[in-house]
Image: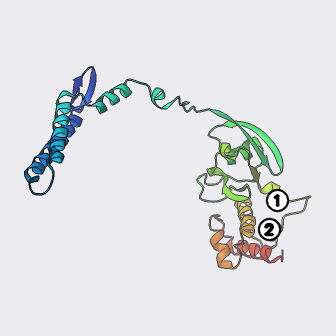
Amino acid sequence: MTERAQIRTRLDGVNVPLAERLATALLGGVALSVGARWLRGSAQRRPAAGGMALIAAGTLALGRAIAGRCPVYRTRARWRGEPAAHRWGAVEPLAFRERVEVRLRVNGRDHQVAADARTTLLDLVREQLQLTGTKKGCNLGECGACTVHLDGRRVNACMVLAAAADGRAVTTIEGLAEGGRLHPVQQAFIDHDGLQCGFCTPGQIMSAVALLAEGHAGSDAEIREWMSGNLCRCGAYPGIVAAVRSAATGDA
């Protein structure tokens, strides 16, 4: 037994913590003390039966603590010897699966993909569905270059597990244009020069589309606030704000 091992006593083949027996003895002593005081004052204020009951309970508790035969100990002893499944019912153990089947609708098309359980939605759309318009920037959820729509709400795809998208609808930058015609926000970015190197532009556009749907284009300040999760290292922010404002007012 190491120095850090708990001090325990052994009774009927079951280890009972010494601290529990001391606590029971202390409670018994308190009951005896209160019972004695009760009896001393019983002549003036209280019937003696209450004091006798407290003394009897205290004596019983002390005896059980000394002998270690408290029913609580017996119950805990039985539980210690039984598997948890016997006490609470069978519980299916959690199992980690290395690969998962993911079914999702991407840009209006249904896909069923087998992927590593740790695969992010970003890697799934880029590496397995070959939709490389969604960019991998910081891979920490800070730059917004990987922004996509998940059930209509913008998310950073690098921070969402592919398995979490099972049964859900995903829209990437490739899914905005319809019939060869650019989405109004895409056209506005071109018209107002809201880009330079273009790396962050897909994420900027996806956030702008969501921003308009959310109704957060009331002013330039509001646009900047609700686009603040998308960084442009080239500093094309004036053009980005102008593009979003133009798309919001229908001037694109």
Q: Quadrant of residue 102?
A: top right
- Disc 1 residue type (three-letter): Leu
The crowd level at tag 1 (other Cα within 10 Å; few <14, some 14-19, many 20+) is: some
Q: Position of residue 228 (x, y in %)?
A: 62, 68
Q: In the depicted view, which residue is nearer to us: 74 or 96?
A: 74
Q: Residue at x 48, y 28 (%)?
A: 85
Circle nearer the N terminus (1, 2): 1
Q: Quadrant of residue 249?
A: bottom right
| Position above or below: 139 against 214 | above
Q: Residue furthest right?
A: 179
Q: Position of residue 223 (x, y in %)?
A: 68, 74
Residue underneath mark 2? 185
Q: CA distance from mark 1 to mark 2?
A: 9 Å
Is residue 195 visible from the viewing direction of this image?
no
Indicate how the structure is coloured in the image. rainbow
Q: In the depicted view, which residue is nearer to us: 52 or 216?
A: 52
Is residue 249 visible from the viewing direction of this image?
yes
Q: Is residue 196 left or right of residue 137?
A: right
Q: In the depicted view, which residue is nearer to us: 237 or 47?
A: 47
Q: Is residue 141 left or right of residue 102?
A: left
* SS category of the residue bearing label 2: helix
Q: Are marks 1 and 2 in contact (CB under 8 Å)?
A: yes
The crowd level at tag 2 (other Cα within 10 Å; few <14, some 14-19, many 20+) is: many
Q: In the depicted view, which residue is nearer to us: 40 or 163?
A: 40
- Disc 2 residue type (three-letter): Val
Q: Residue furthest bottom?
A: 219
Residue underneath mark 1? 176
Q: Quadrant of the C terminus?
A: bottom right
* SS category of the residue bearing label 1: loop
Q: Is residue 156 left or right of residue 104?
A: left
